[in-house]
Amino acid sequence: MEENIKHIQLNDLHIALGGKMVPFAGYNMPVRYSSDKEEHLCVRNGVGVFDVSHMGEFLVEGPEALNLIQKVTSNDASKLVDYQAQYSCFPNETGGIVDDLIVYRYSEEKYMLVVNASNIEKDWNWVNQHNTMGAKLTNISDELSLFAVQGPKAIEAVQSLTSVDLSSVKFYHFTVGDFAGKQDVIISGTGYTGAGGFEIYVKNEDAEEVWNAIFEAGKDFDIKPIGLGARDTLRMEMGYCLYGNDITDTTSPIEAGLGWITKFTKDFTNSEALKAQKEAGVTRKLVGFIMQEKGIPRGHYPIVDAGGELIGEVTSGTMSPSMNVGIGLGYVKVDFAKPGCEIFVQVRNKNLKAIVEKLPLYRG
């Protein structure tokens, strides 16, 4: 198995920086450099940089580009304007989700889809399979590196590297400009932390130079490299779904609380069935919760009611570094899905009390 692990462009640099490397989604990735807690708080309170170059990118071009995107994604991409991005998902034919993704619109006939690393091949095949209208598809996943500069100090830390006014790049919008002396860099007001910041897409050959420039520019702001461990705890505090945990081939976007990206103003894969599900109502829902007793919830731990009856399962859980309590996401029967509901997580055969909370769990 080991020899099949792919390496991102800056693999050796992360090792030199002391990154603990682990196999993740088929790639050798830095999980942490110091401690998850320290890195998490660095992003929440200051600025940190994730190398997430394992993510996949597909270009969709030509007169049929929008038609294809409308067919395979749940959100309504016709609402996008140039240089706007949109969170969406690929529904499958059986009520679940192939993947979640971000759609970037450059122009009427040019889009970029950013997909999860673990699903690059699956997604590529899925989109091609549905491309009956002849849109031009290009998989550029192996050509780009992606750095997420995240945190409340992100703008001031890297503003000196670009002539683009970073404060003018709105949330879920992007621009293409100069960055760290390189041209045609995508600067996107997106991220997976809820702490603010940008995602910077650069050509692989420019990756090391740009990475070093970011750290040079940000050194007065105590900028640090951040691993996947903190990325996971940061997204859990916000209640952002992780594919493979909170959303899968068998979870519907309606159950997962992704009704807001599921638009029935158009036809898309399995839209009739999902619309019927929305109208009929679901039997389980994805919720966020905060532990009221000492204990750390983990994926697959059972969730029970006060009488000990099984009502669901944890999909993601951790000790929140910002709040110092156990937090998690999980599916529960719909009667227990309202904020304020009392549920119990089975941790080592003990039923520990938790309260369902409105997302995000961390409110700063």
Image: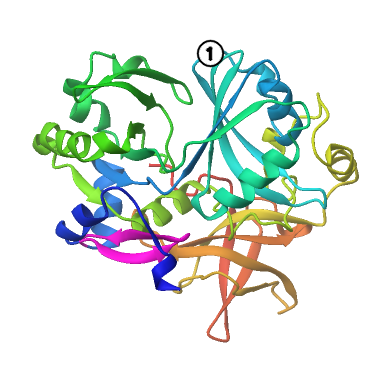
| 67 to the left or right of 289 | right
For the image shown, how many numbered marks are present on the structure?
A: 1
Question: Residue at 86% across / 38% down in the picture?
Answer: 275
Crowding near the residue tagged with mark 1, few <14, some 14–19, many ≥20 C-alpha atoms within 10 Å:
some
In terms of image quadrants, where is residue 247?
A: bottom right
Could you tell me residue 253's position as x and y percent? 72, 46
Could you tell me residue 188's position as x and y percent? 40, 27
354 lies above or below 213: below
Could you tell me residue 86's position as x and y percent? 57, 28
The quadrant the C terminus occupies is top left
Q: Which colour scheme is used?
A: rainbow
The quadrant the N terminus occupies is bottom left
Q: Give the range drawn in magenta.
A: 19-34
Q: Which one is in front, 150 or 331? A: 150
User: Please, which residue is most extreme toward the bottom here?
Assistant: 349
State the residue position of label 1. Answer: 82
Q: Which one is in front, 134 or 251? A: 134
Q: Which amino acid does label 1 sit on?
A: Asp
Question: Is residue 31 one of those drawn in magenta?
Answer: yes
Mark 1 residue element: loop
Could you tell me residue 313's position as x and y percent? 65, 68
Q: Which one is in front, 41 or 168? A: 168
Question: Residue at 48% across / 59% down in the picture?
Answer: 25
| 303 to the left or right of 46 | right
Question: Residue at 63% across / 46% down in the picture?
Answer: 123
Question: Residue at 38% across / 52% down in the picture?
Answer: 231
Q: Is the magenta stretch mostly helix, strand or loop?
A: strand
174 lies above or below 276: above
Question: Is residue 138 one of those drawn in magenta?
Answer: no
103 lies above or below 245: above
